[in-house]
Amino acid sequence: TRAGERDTQAGGGLLRPRERAPKIRYSLVHELADNDIPVAVACRVLGVSRSGYTDWFGRPASIREQRNTELVKMIREIHEESRRSYGSPRVHAELTLGRGEQVSRKRVERLMREAGIQGIYRRRGRRNPVNEPTEEDLVKRAFDVQAPDLLWVTDITEHPTEEGKLYCAAVLDCFSRRIIGHSIDIRQTTKLVVDAMAAAVARRKPAKDATILHSDHGTQFTSWTFGKRLRDAGLLGSMGTVGDCFDNAMMESFWGSMQLELLDTRKWQTRAELAAAVFEWIECWYNPFRRHSSLGMLSPVDYEERHRTSNTTT
């Protein structure tokens, strides 16, 4: 076996052969030949000489090339497990922290670049003008806290399907970035946000007047019903500036990740299909496994577990 021997991103290397290192292109020729594509045709399409491929194929792989082959295989596995969302920083973290491999980040970057493996990245948006606040903001954009259940944030997002829009409300713990409650409905009602808050309260059981729940000024959050349920749960309400997404930046960041890594990856036929995918992405991927640079490349669940363990031992 040789470096970069597999390229599961179908056709990606065939469209831009000059962007690949020669050894990677030779390995692609070998793969195409295994699939009954004539070597001469594969060499011409990938922009390499047949004599160069023959020389490469005839010599034994070096120790470094064998190691690169192993690394590329693991990188592909990690990339697939991340739903093809991880770039080199998180792939490197999974290799070193998750699998105990000793490899530099630069080497991972190079191997991913040569093999045509890319994460997905968010485009930066422009800040919009804002209105004056109408209620007290207890957070004032200070989202960094030192323990779980001190500060929660909540918000609503929507996404279309062939049947119509689907709405999701979620509650996020700012300490670990963990989604601790969420609800999904076909209508954007007060019940949607109340159910998400109730799920968070049932899961975490916060002490009375110890947890801030921060939101925007959406009508669901300013409703009498939501305010009463919030007070009954012993939570402290907080709202940011009207129309300023930066006042709920942590929640906006979560929605951006879900939009990029799940919602925009395909067209959704039914609301039920999308609802199941959102639940699976949050509970089976984001919370237990998705690594965060702000958490030392740990997942939300692992970050909370490390905090709990350190408090127990001390």
Image (spheres, rainbow, N blue to C red):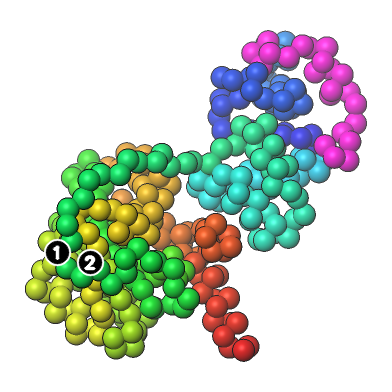
Of 114 and 32, nearer the camera is 114
Which of discs 1 and 2 lies nearer the camera? The answer is: 1
Percent across and percent down for residue 82 are 53, 50
Which residue is identified by label 1? 134
Q: Quadrant of the N terminus?
A: top right
Percent across and percent down for residue 273 are 31, 51
* The furthest residue to the front: 132
Q: Residue at x 40, y 44 (%)?
A: 260
Q: Quadrant of the C terminus?
A: bottom right
Please determine whether, in this image, residue 67 is positioned above or below residue 243. above
**Secondary structure of the magenta portion, mostly?**
helix
Percent across and percent down for residue 286 are 46, 59
* Quarter where residue 5 is shown: top right
Q: Residue at x 17, y 53 (%)?
A: 131
Please determine whether, in this image, residue 25 is positioned above or below residue 260. above
Of 243 and 152, nearer the camera is 243
Q: Residue at x 31, y 59 (%)?
A: 248
User: Does 7 appear in magenta?
Assistant: no
* Quarter where residue 9 is shown: top right
Q: Secondary structure at mark 2?
A: strand
What is the three-letter code of the residue carrying label 2? Met
Which residue is identified by label 2? 239
Left or right, residue 289 beside residue 218: right
